[in-house]
Image (cartoon, rainbow, N blue to C red):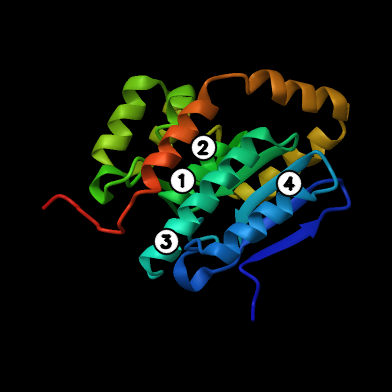
């Protein structure tokens, strides 16, 4: 069976972890989360790139074809992953093209740097599904009002707006290539200083908000309540 993520270590000192479920637009199941967690945890350097083998989609979010019990487990595992991403000493660079929805969008929020292509489409599907999605980390990136708007409206944020409001850090034609170049530069810096820098910048109340959001979503019954 094909692994849902591909992992490779670049000789310049960083690791790539690429989602590889193109047939589902990289919908996230338990095996995908396990692959991401393991790939980040044992990365040998100070930088990890998250991306997709398929350039037309970063991730459509949690796999909605799973049964309710499996979906709940994937949600819990994803929030554990986000927490580990925030606490990791690694600099996590996400390279996103195409849709980044729900859990996929939260991978962007949990990362340290976000590079995106001009066709990126980011969407936080939450209250329409009875969920709270992304509210734990969005305020620190884009401000309280914008975070409220994106979570309540569940509207699609396209590339230019995402850059303007700080939801992504750079727009480039080839995010994976730019991420590799950037990662190689970081690998040339003092590794202890890089780790300390992330620790200082990450000091916030995001962790409390993340636990609160995760606890709410643990009660999700799997129903979708989109507006008509």
> Within 10 Å of the Cα at label 4, are there few (<14), some (14-19), or many (20+) other Cα atoms?
many
Q: Residues within 10 Å of mark 1 (few under 14, many from 20)?
A: many
Q: Quadrant of residue 221?
A: bottom left
- Numbered circle sitting on residue 71: 3
- Which mark is in front, 3 or 1? 3
Distance from disc 3 to disc 1, alpha carbons, whole Å, reads 17 Å
Mark 3: few, some, or many residues within 10 Å (few <14, many ≥20)? many
> Which label lies toward us, 2 or 3?
3
Residue at 57% across / 42% down in the picture? Answer: 82
Closer-to-camera residue (169/24): 24
Of marks 2 and 3, which one's residue comes earlier in the chain? Answer: 3
- Asked whether residue 123 is in view, the answer is no
Left or right for 181, reference 165: right
Give the mark, 2 or 4, whose residue is nearer the N terminus.
2
Mark 1: secondary structure: helix
Badge 3 element: helix
Q: CA distance from mark 1 to mark 4?
A: 21 Å
Sequence-first tag of 3 and 1: 3
Q: CA distance from mark 3 to mark 4?
A: 33 Å
- Residue on which the image places disc 2: 109
Point out the tag, 3 or 4, that comes first from the N-terminus: 3
> Earlier along the polypeptide chain: callout 1 or callout 4?
1
Q: Nearer the viewer, residue 51 or 5?
A: 5
Q: Which mark is residue 119?
A: none
The disc label shown at residue 105, or none: 1
In terms of secondary structure, where does tag 2 sit?
helix
Q: Residue 68's quadrant in the figure?
A: bottom left
- Nearer to us in this view, 99 or 85: 85
Tell me the residue at 48%/23% (across/down): 140
Please say whether residue 14 is visible from this viewpoint. Answer: yes
Q: Which residue is mark 4?
A: 180
């Amino acid at each position: 069976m094909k692994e849902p993520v591909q992992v490779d270590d670049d000789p310049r000192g960083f690791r790539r972890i690429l989602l590889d479920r193109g047939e589902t637009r990289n919908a996230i199941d338990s095996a995908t989360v396990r692959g991401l967690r393991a790939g980040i945890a044992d990365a040998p350097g100070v930088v990890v790139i998250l991306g997709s083998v398929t350039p037309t989609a970063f991730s459509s979010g949690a796999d909605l074809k799973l049964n309710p019990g499996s979906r709940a487990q994937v949600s819990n595992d994803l929030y554990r992953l986000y927490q580990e991403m925030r606490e990791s000493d690694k600099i996590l660079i996400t390279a996103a093209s195409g849709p980044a929805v729900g859990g996929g969008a939260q991978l962007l929020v949990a990362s340290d740097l976000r590079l995106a292509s001009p066709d990126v489409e980011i969407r936080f599907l939450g209250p329409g599904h009875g969920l709270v999605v992304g509210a734990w980390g969005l305020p620190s990136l884009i401000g309280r009002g914008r975070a409220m708007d994106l979570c309540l409206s569940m509207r699609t944020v396209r590339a230019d707006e995402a850059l303007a409001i700080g939801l992504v850090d750079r727009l480039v034609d080839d995010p994976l290539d730019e991420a590799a170049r950037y990662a190689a530069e970081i690998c040339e810096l003092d590794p202890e200083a890089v780790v300390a820098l992330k620790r200082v910048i990450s000091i916030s109340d995001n962790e409390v908000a993340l636990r609160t959001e995760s606890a709410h979503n643990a009660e999700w019954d799997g129903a979708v309540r989109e507006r008509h």
